[in-house]
Amino acid sequence: SALQFGLLILFLKKRIYVGNMKYVLVSALKSAFAAAIMGFGVHFINSMWLVTGSDAGLWVTVLNLMVLVIIGVIIYFAVARILGCRELISIMHIFSVRKGLSK
């Protein structure tokens, strides 16, 4: 992810005025912060409440993984919304437009 971000900055720097890079950096930092909070939240929930260990069966492990993915998505989008990430606003706008079209 960091490598992709570095390449994005490198390519955008050639095409966009450097003063506009502030918005890209702020957006990337917000996304990184939301991802870090998500990681801590998933780790905390996994270590405190979910069944772990080598004696857990396959279905328990699959169920734990599904729960962690769902919790991770919820945490990420909640934190991103609180921080006002522009990407999240764009995604929400796309879904609201599609929902309006399906009626």
Image (cartoon, rainbow, N blue to C red):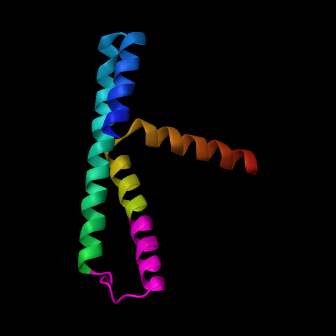
Viewer-proximal residue among 60 and 98? 60
Residue 51 highlighted magenta (yes or no): yes
Total number of numbered discs in the rendering: 0
Residue 76 in the image, given as x and y percentages of width and height: 37, 54
> What residue sits 44% from the left and 66% below the top?
70
> What residue sits 46% from the left and 72% below the top?
66
Residue furthest to the front in view is: 54
Residue 1 in the image, given as x and y percentages of width and height: 35, 41
The answer to which image quadrant residue 44 occupies is bottom left
Q: Identify the main secondary structure in magenta.
A: helix
Tell me if residue 24 comes above or below residue 33 in the rendering.
Answer: above
Residue 100 in the image, given as x and y percentages of width and height: 69, 46
The answer to which image quadrant residue 40 occupies is bottom left
The answer to which image quadrant residue 25 occupies is top left
Which residues make up the magenta segment? 49-71
Residue 38 highlighted magenta (yes or no): no
> What residue sits 27% from the left and 64% below the top?
41
Q: In the shown orientation, is residue 6 left or right of residue 65?
A: left
> What residue sits 29% from the left and 43% below the top?
32
Viewer-proximal residue among 77 and 38? 38
Residue 23 in the image, given as x and y percentages of width and height: 33, 25
